[in-house]
Image: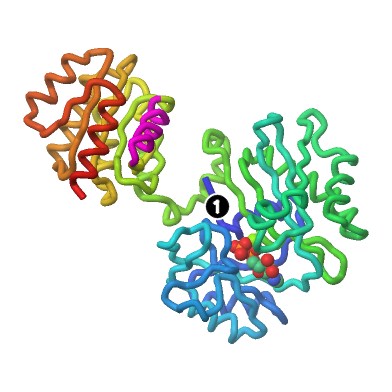
Amino acid sequence: MNIHEYQAKAILKAYGAPVAAGVAIFSPEEAEQAARQLGGPLWVVKSQIHAGGRGKGRFKELGPDAKGGVRLAKSVEEVVANAREMLGRTLVTKQTGPAGKQVNRLYIEDGADIARELYLSLLVDRTVGRVAFVVSTEGGMDIEQVAHDTPEKIVTLAIDPCTGVTAADAAKIADALKLEEPARGEMTKLADILYRAFTEKDMSLLEVNPLIVMKDGHLRVLDAKVSFDNNALFRHPDIVALRDKTEEDEKEIEASKYDLAYVALDGNIGCMVNGAGLAMATMDIIKLYGAEPANFLDVGGGASKEKVTAAFKIITADPNVKGILVNIFGGIMRCDTIAEGVVAAVKEVGLKVPLVVRLEGTKVEEGKRILNESGLDVVAANDLDDAAQKIVNAVKGAR
Ligand code: ADP
Ligand code: MG
């Protein structure tokens, strides 16, 4: 689960991290109030969407010459004028994709006098099985470029979970960031704060880009992007309360209601599969035959007919889906349950695209019989390879 920058900053502030004063707002009127409350003389108006690259992003409706999604303002009037221009508009950044995201809330923040922009993040480094700091002196808006062109400028430091961040770790981070006092001493505290926040709140990513050294020599967290481990959310009701569903894919929200493992993708072949491994293999083989999957969907073991019906409806509701592949290897999952779910869903919402079904395993004969007797226009497949070729050909033929 992702949260907004201002929410992430509130969490980090509670842990004692240096963040600027700021107010989240939904209307120009609230923007004026916030600007007066903060007092100036410099404000920053920041689009709150679940995507980075806002500074360099552009509003679809305003054209390439208008300012981006993070704007400096030098008066209350300027704050309000920017808020009016930004609210309700669609911001397109490198991370939103071409469709962009509607900006429904803004964060009005005290402006900082920036001397240096640094990069700092924490993530779970799977190769060493530890939480690691990733830091670079080249922070700001182009870290992806730095990683690509000059990867030696990015330093990774894994933390021993038994000790947490040690003085030696903090010194290494400060050295890598070329920090001098007072920022150097502040980094020791901040590294510990960020590590504790990350582990205690079960984050999967905490990215501060930029972390800045201000003209007065102090450190400040200027941007914050946080993702949480969904599997640990049950123990953080305070975090769940921060969820902004308007930022999420509707199909994924619907899927989460039924506890389906679903991820929307860009292709046009909808997949309904049981088991994550088989789902991955199904996506691979679709690609092998020259098409792209529209989703990853694992209905899981022992899913009910209702769950299968919901899953099939989510797939058919996606306008990008030009064909559906049902690929089930029945173990605990029964093929007849899958067939019943598919038939029930089609009865409700119809079927406008080709459907290829490959069933194998528990109750396979019943499953096939249910599909045959339903009168549905189903293309039966013998194995995974056959199924993938059939659906890819069907979709290509439809174009
Ligand atoms: P994004 O990463 O989505 O582009 P950031 O929060 O990193 O958004 O802001 C982009 C840039 O805007 C920063 O690199 C910094 O130069 C500037 N900026 C952001 N917040 C402030 C602030 N409070 N004061 C001064 N400049 C800021
Ligand atoms: Mg940033």
> In percent of the image, x 86 and y 51: which residue is there?
174
Locate residue 338, reporting x and y percent: 24, 25
Determine the secondary structure under disc 1: loop
In the rendered image, residue 242, in percent from the top left (x then y), is placed at: 53, 51
- Residue topped by disc 1: 3
- Toward the right, the furthest residue is 181
Magenta segment, prevailing SS (helix, strand or loop): helix
**Residue at image x 59%, y 84%?**
78
Residue 1 horizontal side relative to residue 12, left or right: left
Looking at the image, is 230 positioned above or below residue 183?
above
Q: Which residues are magenta?
A: 278-290
Report the residue at 29% width, 40% height from top. Answer: 270
Q: Residue at x 49, y 75 (%)?
A: 86
Picture quadrant of ligand 1: bottom right
Does the numbered disc 1 mark a residue whose Cβ is under 8 Å from ligand 1?
no
Compared to residue 40, the image places residue 280 above or below, namely: above
Q: Position of residue 322 (x, y in %)?
A: 24, 46
The reply to whether the magenta stretch includes residue 308 is no
Answer whether residue 35 is visible to the viewer in this image. yes
